[in-house]
Amino acid sequence: MRLTMTTDRGVAGLTLLFALTAPLFLSGYWIGTLLTDVLLLGVVAASLIFLSAYGGMLSLGQVAVYGIAGFVVGNATTNGNTKGLNLGWDPWWGVILGILIAVVVAVLFGALASRSVGIYFLMITLTYSVIANLSFGQVTDVSGFGGISGIPTPGLIGVASAHQNRLYYVALGAAIAVYALLRYIVRTPFGLTLQGLRDDPVRMSSLGYNVALHRTIAFGFAGFIAAIGGVLFVWWNGHIDPTSIGLANTINVLVIAVVGGLYRIEGAWIGALFFVILNNYSQQISFIGPRFATLIGAIFLVIVLVSPGGLIGIWERALTYVSGRNQGPPDPSTVAGGTPEPTT
Amino acid sequence: MTAVPAARFGRVSALQARFARRFGWSVLGVVIVVPALWVLFLAPTTGGWATSFGSAVHDPKDFLITLVNGITDAGLYFVVASGFTLIFGLMRVVNMAHGAFFLFGGYVALKLQRHMVGQGGSFGLTSDQVNLTHWILPALLGTVVVAGMGLVMQQLFLRWNQGQDLRQALITIAVSIILADQMLAHFGGVAEDVSWPRNFDKFVNLRVSGIQYTLTRLVILGIALAIGGLLWVWLKRTRTGMVIRAGVDDRAMVSALGINIQLTFAIAFAVGSALAGLGGVIGGSFASLAPGVDANWLLYSLVVVIIGGMGSLGGAAIGSVLLGMTSNFSAAYLPENYTYYSIIFTFVLVAIVLAVRPLGLFGRPA
């Protein structure tokens, strides 16, 4: 146990040091294209892991919320797109509006799905994602298939392609803040209640807790996190279209979360790092070429079948093995598919 | 069995709960009555709110066409979603690969049809090159191949994870990722369609308001009704069907009685997948096959079973009709400048049903 904790702290410190100094020794391509993407995908995946690990709600709706934030920012801050509202606001107001609207929608989504658990929740939130994708494709007032281009970043960051390090540090700051916030929230009375609901909703409800309300708030809060990811995405990409929130990307975020490890927040960024780097470099392997989706699908399948704890699960098992103390596997109730939902 | 109401309302008192439910029902009433009034009497043909056809009183012919379109669309939704709900009802497996199975069935049929008839022109085959056999044989092959594929997936990956429903859902997601990517690699990204046989590709006179209606849509409806009837007879009148219904209620008890529940699972999974494959052939003839179509059909299946109640065949039928009606009427009766908002009504439909009945109209707690 002590070894695990010390190693954890050591790894965390080293990771932070690496992340902070990375622009000194990594190329602009690594910083601007790969690692910034890792950080922002990790933020979205973290919102999914938070809901799944602490609320027992495996959500496929995070990308929908992320997309809503991104599209609102795009509509609010651009000027001169053929489609969209072209409001031409200051980027910061766009961010505030984007996050606000995304959270309101997330609360609505959460309220509708809050009385469902397990696979029902998964199916309902998947419906949100697909409908959000189709809606943005059809409603040309806000997007249409071409999407919104030329989304500006605040003057502080400047043009993303010219100042890659600035956006990288903003994304890093956001990722650290999100991580710290999530770690804090799960220790508050609200976070503890949420974990209680995850483990035994019936008992919590007879103790007087409003189950649906807590789930709704948790979904809204996770929506807030996902919205931060959406804002970072449009700053980084400068463009958002319905494909950005299509089924493929919805599932990619799930893959990132599961491959990283669905029961610890850190898993989000580990999964994102694995995903982005594999996506970038697997194309150079001759027999894979453009078939990255098949590769990641196969890895996902193996992880789900063999190690439900994902890469973090494998790491922890290795540590336990080294320290010679058998802590047993992670709490099965927090791992997707560990135990079936209690039936009534 | 008391867990669900308790979990639903938490600290809310019984009185408040009753109020909430009544409020839900009255909202439901409004959202049914207002659109109905709009479609029947109010929809104008001029002004800022002009619709394509105007109200049903003004233009009964197009109202009827929209109605029949809704019903025939519902037929195809039902074929696909009944397979989804059959698998879910018995095994609690949410087959996220259902959309990919749909697309694969369509592609298998497409390839066999092209093999039998030839490649056709740059737009593929035309229906006068295709006779009935050239459609039925590919349809059968697509159905059977997808049934086999579903069976293999169930035996290889799902069987030993019985009872871990989230994990099974993740497994089927993994399969769908791989399958979709492989289909893109082998069949390309260009939209193609299976050609209807010349016998189907014509108009018939409905003898109501002189409407000339496409026969293919009626064929789809006929197939859907036949499938619905067969499923009903199979589930209600045969031994296997009886075992399946018993298994839906209590799996443990069924296998304790010495029935080979694994065999039943395998049969149900094959049949459910076959329906996705057949749906893919019909959908590929009616519309087209392309990457991304799988996501749409997964959505339709999900919406139908979320509305109707998961695992209920009757629910799938009602859900299909509601989805077919909502999509067709919202596309036809929204003001012309806003018809592209019709997709949002699908979400509204799901939202309303979930608000009033979290388990769907015919859903029961697991």
Image: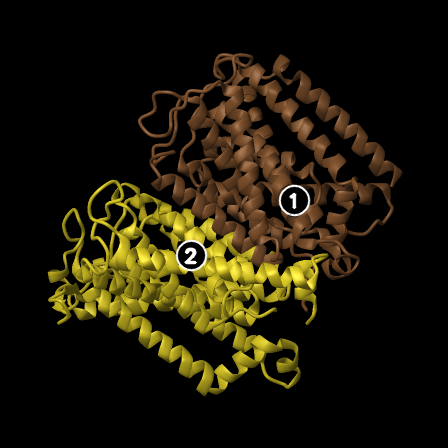
Chain colours: A brown, B yellow
The residue type indicated by label 2 comes to Val
Res B321 → quadrant: bottom left
Q: Measure how far apart labels 1 and 2 are at the Cα level.
A: 27 Å
Where residue B135 appears, as percent x and y from the top left, is 22, 66
Residue B65 circle label: none
Q: Is residue B34 left or right of residue B68?
A: right
Res A208 quadrant in image: bottom right
Using the image, name the chain to which the residue with label 1 belongs.
Answer: A
| A290 in relation to B22, above or below | above
Of residues B67 and B42, the one nearer the viewer is B42
Q: Amino acid at mark 1?
A: Ile
Q: Quadrant of the N terminus of chain A?
A: top right
Residue at image location 67% in from the left, 52% down from the top: A56
B157 displayed left or right of B287: right
* Quadrant position of the C terminus of chain A in the picture: bottom right
Residue A277 visible in the current orientation: no
Residue that appears at 49% across and 17% down:
A160
Determine which residue is flagged by label 1: A217
Residue at 44% over, 56% down: B349
Residue found 65% across the figure and 48% down from its top: A52
x and y percentages locating residue B60 in the rendered image:
19, 62
Chain letter belonging to callout 2: B
To which residue does mark 2 refer?
A: B31
